[in-house]
Amino acid sequence: MPISIVNLELTSGARTFGVKFNGALDETEKAKYGCGIYISGCAVGSIASKCPEMIIGWQVVKVNKVDFRDKTMFDIKRAVMSGTPGKLYMELEQNAELFRTYNMVREVTKATNDPKHPTTIVELEKSAEGCFGLRFGGVLDAREKNYTGYGGILLLDMPKPQSPASYSTDCKLAEFLQIVNINGIDCTQLTMMQVVPVFSEFGDTMLMVLRENKRLEEHHTKANHVMSEWIDAIKEKR
């Protein structure tokens, strides 16, 4: 049976233990995305990095015997320093949903913090039928990517009728923009064929970061024009 809870103790003569945390920053994020803190990494060469029970991505359930399930990052430093000097006790629990959610939030935030490339954020909830109703364009597959020298997908107009995308004002404003990130996944070099399996990893919420990419938009327009000419030529032969 897989281990779902671990208890660990760190002893350090230094001022820090080298544990890195992620999760709800404050009450605002806690209300929007849910409560919880998890282990996001360890400083190189630190006491934490040498601890086999320190599992990256697992939720911090207790810190120095204080229940941390409903705490935020605002509380973590005080809790770590509240115990016996040089000692840190933690209880960790597997929580894949917490890790996925806040990893997505941080990656999306990182993607938007580029002053040279303004971004648009689109958030959608799945319909009762289990779809978002989006349409994509851009670089089709690996062969086309090798030919052009770049990948990328665009959010197109005319989403599926009566779908979440069709009712979204944000989607209308983002038409023909490149999708650079979906739920924390970097999509800048993905092709249309590659993005399809990515959808299976999404839950009921899709958070997209989009930005202008004229080269990709022109490629899509040109590819559509070539396809239309090809279809017309076939029709004429018939």
Image (spheres, helix red, strand yellow):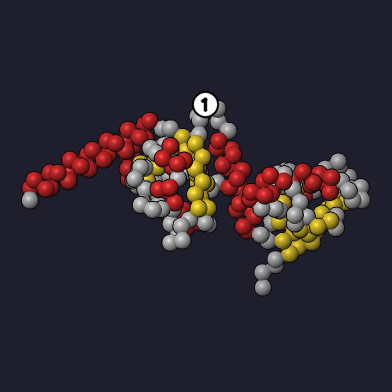
Quadrant of the rendered image containing residue 45:
top right
Q: Is residue 226 left or right of residue 209?
A: left
Task: Reply above or below: 66 against 231.
Answer: below
In-front residue for pair 13/231: 231
Q: Is residue 217 above or below residue 89?
A: above
Q: Residue at x 88, y 48 (%)?
A: 82
On the image, numbered disc 1 is attached to which residue? 116
Residue 45 in view:
no
Which residue is more in the foreground, 30 or 235? 30
Q: Is residue 91 above or below residue 206?
A: below
Residue toward you, 173 or 99: 173
Q: Residue 89: horizontal and vertical position, in percent? A: 84, 55
The percent position of residue 182, horizontal first and vertical second, equals 50, 46
Which type of secondary structure does the marked residue at label 1 adopt? loop
At x 72% / y 61%, what residue is drawn?
Answer: 93
Q: Position of residue 84 (x, y in %)?
A: 92, 51
Tell me where residue 2 sits by quadrant: bottom right
Horizontally, is 151 left or right of 91 in the view?
left
Image height of 40 relative to 180, above or below: below
Q: Residues within 10 Å of mark 1 (few under 14, many from 20)?
A: few
